[in-house]
Amino acid sequence: RHSLCTMGTRARKAASAALRRLRRAEELQLDYDDIDSLAQQALAGFGALNAPSEVDGWRWWAQLLGTAAVILASWSAWLYYTKGQLADLQEKQLHDVDVAVAKADRLQIRATLAEKDARAKSSEVCVLQAALAESKQALAATKVAQDRAESELAALAAAESHTALQPAFDDAMAEADARNTTVLAAKLFDTLAIYARDLSSSDKKAAARARTINAGNAAFQRRVRDAHAHYHVLEALGYQHVGGDTGGSWTMMAPVFEARRGANFFSYCAARLGERCASICGKLAEELGLQFCDGLRQGLNPRDFVVWADFDSATAGAITMQVLKKGPPAGNINASLEKMMRHAQSSHAISKLQYKVGSETYTLDLSRLTQRNGQTGFLRSVSFFGQGGRAVEPYQIVCGTTLLPPLRGPTRNDAVAEQTARLHASDVLQPPLFTPAGLEMDAQARAALISSLGSRDERFETVTVVAVHEVNPAPERRSAFCSAAAQLKARRGTSTQHAFHGSSLGALASIARDGFVSTNTVRNAAQFGKGIYLSPVGSGGRAGMMAASPQYASRDADRVQHVLFCEVATGEPEQVRDGGCAGSDQDKPSSEHVDTGVDTLVKRTDGTVDYTKAVRLVVWTNKMNEFILPVAVVSFRIDSAFEEEDDDGDEETETEEEEGEDGDLYD
């Protein structure tokens, strides 16, 4: 019995182990072959029951029971495994069905959206087709209207006679000539002559290019758009402006072009413009006074070493035209060439001018003031008139292979000063730069001058304000002054002041037109430093009114003096040092806290400066054209009872002043 119990226990343990292995096989998802293998292993484990025993019958029953237990356990495991496989298969089939249904739903949604898009696109196509049809109809109507307009223009252009176009063009030229300075007029006519020549040319490309002008081009704006009444001349040529006021283009319709070209109108315009430009350049060349070193001669006086000769009119005109085209903007040809010469050493400036006279080509070196013949290589020095009649000459004089050290050559101050002394205000103070002042400006300038001159004994001396002419400076000059004044007011809290600047009539006209120019030739302006000297309004009697002194405000042909009434952005002034006869080298503010200078600095109780106590207001040369804005020219005459006795002395004084008149320009 004991042995039977022992074998039964072993059989139960073997069956339990077999079941555990089957369950683990299910967890590991083994197939039926694996389960069968485990069962075989379980059956093999019962081989131990075959151990020798005393009771064979009991051994047989124990083996039978163990085998039955193993078979039952294997069969149960197989049934459990089969049930799990069927459940997994069913779950997988249900999942596949759900996936298929979802996919079908998505496909249906896509189909619905595609159908909607197709309907929307179909409607858009219909709309576009309708718009295209309307555009074609509008284009056809526009084409018909354009053809009708071109035919009408052609008929109108054909109806215009050659004799009717010429007077209109001449009138437009005369208006532009009258409203511009000689420099602006020369630039305008030279550029328009190029357009007219291209329009009359047989070169189709050049003619087509000239029919459309880009008004926003920098060269066009500098040479054409800056001139007054330029649009009248362009319209007289046949151009029409298209676009905004600051840009756009000038175009010429094909019928107008063909009709006027067939009537040789453009050839006539080119000839008239060229003639007028050549005439202006001739006058400018005379004013410029171009000379060349014609030879050297020996003499006791070093000034007689150099023989200067005038350029012929063709060469002088060619040089003048190059200065007009490439020089900086200036209302005076002398100022333009002088600026080019001063900036010739800069890397970004023009240092040489090339021009052609006949078959000969020449090069003018602005840095050395020499002319070189391109064919022969002959080199000679060149001289010209600067502003105020000063002769501008090279530092090294050359004629061929002969060199001379810097010598003071012939000066033309005497001729120009004599001409200036014979000027009449009516010939100089003309539009558009000068116009008669309005009532408000006239009253303000007169009152300022009278208060500055002070009281006088009318028995011996009377002051008469002859006229007040308002100055119309360039827009960029006014803009620069307004910007500087606004900055000083924001930084210093100061407002602008009015002051007078005295000079000769010709010098004042040049200052109003081109601005102040700083050079090394400074007369009566070094005592308190290098700058522009002005007399503040109300600065005292005649002794204190420096600007009204004949030493500065020299008399013209009518014995009338002229002073420039200016608005000055003073900022914070400082008291400048009196350098006496040796002069002062100061040419800029002594610190960043001051901007200008006065010879007498007196402040009121509220901290403001009393400019009526100062005789001189000094604006340094680096800010002279930003801090000073010319407002008007006041013409006055001081009649003295002793004038007849002083006539001879005055003539001598005027003669002395004429020798250095250019100093008035650069105070």
Image (spheres, grey):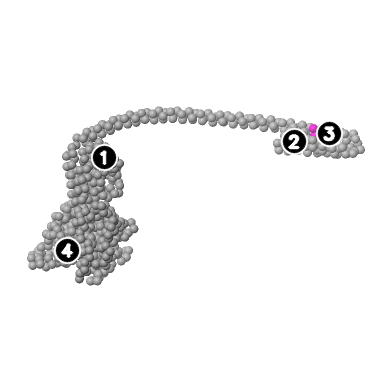
Quarter in which the N terminus is drawn: top right
Please report the residue visible at 22 percent of the width from the left and 62 percent of the height from the top: 294
Disc 4 from disc 1: Cα separation: 52 Å
Instruction: Say which residue label 3 marks.
Output: 65
Say which mark, if any, is on residue 414.
4
Residue 247 seen: no
Tell me the kind of residue under disc 2. Answer: Asp
- Disc 3 or 1, which lies upstream in sequence? 3
Say which mark, if any, is on residue 252.
1
Up/down of 402 relative to 213, above or below: below
* Neighbourhood count class around disc 4 (C-alpha, 10 Å): few under 14, some 14–19, many 20 upward: some
Please report the residue visible at 25 percent of the width from the left and 48 percent of the height from the top: 191
**Disc 4, disc 3: CB below 8 Å?**
no
- Disc 4 or 3, which lies upstream in sequence? 3
Give 539 or 152, whichever is nearer the viewer. 152
Up/down of 466 relative to 45, above or below: below
Disc 3 from disc 1: Cα separation: 124 Å
- Disc 2 or 4, which lies upstream in sequence? 2
Tell me the kind of residue under disc 4. Answer: Asp
Most prominent secondary structure in the magenta stretch? Answer: helix
Instruction: Say which residue label 2 marks.
Output: 34
Where does the magenta region start and end? 65-71
